[in-house]
Each structure stands twice: as structure tokens, then as C-alpha cells.
Image: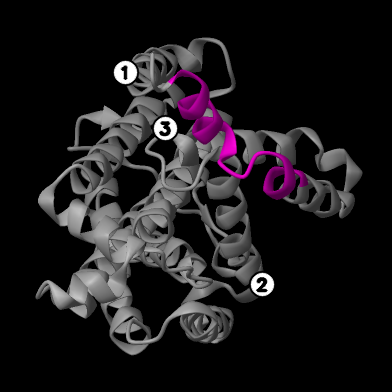
Amino acid sequence: MVNRVLWIIMLVAGLTAPFFAYPVFVMDLLCFALFACAFNLLLGYVGLLSFGHAAFFGGAAYITGYVIKAWGFPPLLGIAAGALFAMVLGAVFGFLAIRRQGIYFAMITLALAQIIYFMILQLPFTGGENGLQGIPRGKLLGLVDLNQSLAMYYFVFAIFLVGFCIIYRTINSPFGEVLQAIHENESRALSLGYDVDRFKLQAFVISATLAGLAGATKAVVFQFAALTTAHWQTSGEVILMTLVGGLGTVFGPVIGAITVASLSHELSAFGSWVQVILGAIFVVCVLVFRRGIIGELHRLFGGR
């Protein structure tokens, strides 16, 4: 019941949002929402806490920006290149980290992500601390001018829906059921004959690819790949978004991303105090409603 209502609200809000809000800001929310959904697939449904997802988000942004700006790729192909890079990087990260659990897994992903961050900082084509600027939006399929805000918005919304549907289908499939079984009791799943490491690696790669898709899209939206997108703090923000919205829920990361990103935007006048405020929200979320916003809605209305 709750999920059906949320599907309708999401579609209606997504189609009408550019007429009531600043389109570029809403596109930013959609990119972070897809990023949070990709992260939730790993943490909420497999139980793997990654502190390295910023590497996929930021790395894909730089690859997309470079191939569009330097090689003249069209925007759709450039975004695909960024997502492909994130998929390969996710396979490498996953192969190195997946056999570890808990804090060891988290620290390995963080260490690997920091390597990517410093590579981005030092490589000559990335622009260093200034980021990769002047990424052209170009035309979609050679026909639709993406410099028009409305056209760009619906392109981003379409990408978000594709990514969201992939996650939704993954969760509600036999593969997703195995992932949840691993999350609930990995030893039992192993005893039933499932290759647990293979399933976890596949989930990690899917999550990394979709995180990269979000980062690549964000680079085209803002025509800029920022160094901060690959920083470990971005990995922390996506964890906060997932927990605030509802860990292990389909729509929770979307609500969490909108909540946290909107608060960051509205409270930007407070400067560095924004992080203190977001930290306080995180503490309240953990202490008062551990299920998150959507988790609490499911608890209240899920049975009706």
C-alpha cells in the first residue's frame, strides 16, 4: 500500500517538479537520490557498509567529463562511459574487499577510494583542485538540445527512473532474495549451497555501476566534475541519506537524499556549521527513529 502510493507520488512529482522548483536543483536531487539508492542496494540488502562509493560517483563524473570534452563524445555515450568505468572499478574494489566483513570491509573500501581521490588530484587532465570545467551538454541523439533546462531535466529524470527500476527489479527477483538471505544469515545461505562471495561481488558491481551513472549524470548537469564528489565525505553523506530515508527500503534513499540535500542547500549560509547540523540530525535519526522516514511509514501503515 505504502509503496504504491509512493510510486504515484514519485512519478507525479518528477514530471511536474521543473514547473514548481528550480530545474537544476531538482536534477541535483535526482542524481543524489540515484546515488543513495545504489548505495542502499549494497548496505540495506546485502549488509555491506562501503566507505568508498564516492570513488565510483566522482570517478565516473571525471571520465564522463573528459570523454565528452576531449574526445567529443555525445552526452549519452559519455554517461555510458562513466558508468562503464564505475562498473570496472567496482569489480576491482569488490574483488579485493568482498572476502572481508564488517569494519575490515569498510576500511578496505575507504583506502581504495582514497587512492582514487589522490589519483584524480594528481592526474593532469582532471584540473586538480579546480576540477574539470567546461563540460558541454551537447545534444541528445543529435536532436534534443540539452542546454535547454527543461530538456535536460527530463533526460535526467529518465536516467533516474531507469536506474531506480533496475534497483527495484534487482531487489524483487530471485537474485534479490538471495542477497537478503545473505544479509540475514550468511552462514545459512552458504550452507544451502549459494556462492556467497559471487553474489556479494555481483551486488557490489551493480551498486558501483549505478553510483557511477549518478555521478556521470551530475557532471553533465553542472558541466563540471568537482574534486569533492570523490572525497570520503561524499561517502559519508550518502550513508546519512540512506539512514535518514530508511535503510533496506525501496523509496527510503530517495526521501533521504531529498531531505539531506535540501537541508544542505537551505543551511548553506551557516558555512561549516552545516556539517554539525547534519551530524545532529544523524544522531537524532539513530536514537529516535532507527527505521528512517519510510521505515516508520511502513511500520504505521504497511499493514493497511
Chain-order first, disc 2 or disc 1: 1
What amino acid does circle 3 point to?
Asn
- Secondary element under disc 1, as helix, strand or loop, is helix
Q: Residue at x 53, y 36 (%)?
A: 29
Is residue 24 rendered to the left or right of residue 59? right
Mark 2 — residue?
Answer: 129
Mark 3 — residue?
Answer: 147
What amino acid does circle 2 point to?
Glu
Magenta segment range? 284-301
Examine the rendering and report whether any part of residue 72 can be seen. no
Residue 4 badge: 1
What is the basis of the colouring in this image? one colour
- Residue 33 painted magenta: no
Snapshot quadrant of residue 267? top right
Distance from label 2 to label 1 (Cα)?
44 Å
For marks 3 and 2, give the one nearer the viewer.
2
Most foreground residue, 47 or 94: 47
Snapshot quadrant of residue 48? bottom left
- Residue 300 painted magenta: yes
Q: Main secondary structure of the magenta part?
A: helix
